[in-house]
Amino acid sequence: MNNNNNLHFVLVHGAGHGAWCWFKLLSLLRSAGHHATAIDLASAGTDPTKLDDVASIEEYVEPLMEFIEVLPLQQKVVLVGHSYGGLSISLAMEKFAHRILVSVFVTAYMPHFLYSPATLLQKLFKSLSVETLMDCEFKFGDDPEMPTSVVYGHNFLREKLYKNCSQEDIELGKLLVRPFKMFFEDLSKESVVTEAKYGSVNRVFVFCEGDEVMEGRFQRLMIEEVPPKAVKYIYGGGHMVMLSKPTQLYQHLVEVAESFNSTNQCNDDHDQVFSNL
């Protein structure tokens, strides 16, 4: 019999955000009896680490790695990353490929194992116009085309990032969003994710129509370059879909998790039968 009580949804925020942005989805998942945890990465959300003290992408994602490390072995991880969080969960997939049932990229960076994740960052930033970025503030290092850190402007947050969100959600974002680093140099290494580990994990992409940050053409590019097992669609949600369309996202996540868990359970039962022969 299929048992979904062994699933644990691990939710990973995008750049500048924190565990708080998943509050609607956490409520839906937990109310339905699912194990669900949202992570604050280093210097994000309520994490006390100062941004300047986070020296590498490895330090940034350490809270996620530590959490997965101590999860009970019988729990199957459903890893969910939003936006920049796609890169964060990709690092976890590389380290814990054997623990993850499926990874869901919610309008998120989904890297290819044949080239460095930084390539995706370059492609997106080169496609964005100054008008699109509005009042965001950037700091640059040696590369004048790739920022080292970013602060979202309130106009950008309201008109692009949180488009289709309620006024309450917009005000919450203004209060809680923090500056963030891009870790471009760390992500420029081709060995960050590999076919043997990252490439072995089931992937599903949630395509968000109306996203004016990670536009449809960029989402389609990633889907075409490194095809996932499935693509789910949410219409009219924009970029912050966990706030604008939480019920639809919840339904997709549960459907995906139960589907892969059922398939995995059948495979386990098949292996058990043959091991007893």
Image (spheres, rainbow, N blue to C red):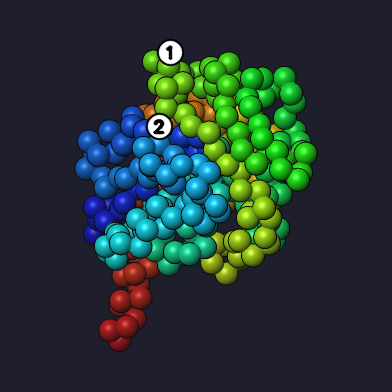
Residue 245 pos. (x, y %):
43, 26
Mark 1 residue element: helix
Q: Residue at x 50, y 48 (%)?
A: 53
> Could you tell whether 239 is left or right of 253 in the image?
right
Q: Position of residue 111 (x, y in %)?
A: 62, 52
Q: Residue at x 57, y 26 (%)?
A: 152
Kind of residue indicated by mark 2? Cys
Q: Is residue 56 visible?
A: yes
- As rendered, which of 146 and 139 lies closer to the eye? 139
Pinpoint residue 92: horizontal percent, then vertical percent. 47, 58
Image quarter in which the C terminus is found = bottom left
Instruction: State the residue at coordinates (38%, 41%).
Output: 48
Residue extending furthest toward the top:
167
Determine if residue 104 is in view.
Answer: no
Quick one: label 2, few (<14), some, or many (20+) residues within 10 Å? Answer: many
* Residue at figure coordinates x 30%, y 62% from the top left: 70
Asked if the residues shown at circle 2 and circle 1 are in contact, with their CB atoms under 8 angstroms apart, the answer is: no
Which residue, as the protein is rendered here, is positioned at the far bottom? 277
**Nearer-the-camera pick, 109 or 249:** 109
Q: Quadrant of the N terminus?
A: bottom left
Per the image, label 2 sits on a secondary structure element best described as: helix
Earlier in the chain: of badge 2 and badge 1, it is: 2
- Residue 21, located in which quarter of the rendered image? top left
The residue wearing badge 1 is 167
Q: Amino acid at mark 1?
A: Gln
Horizontal side of 60 relative to 193 (left or right) equals left
Q: Is residue 58 left or right of residue 267?
A: right
Position of 31 relative to 211 (above/below): below
- Residue 12 screen position, x and y as percent: 43, 44
In the shown orientation, is residue 37 left or right of residue 160? left
Q: Which residue is mark 2?
A: 21
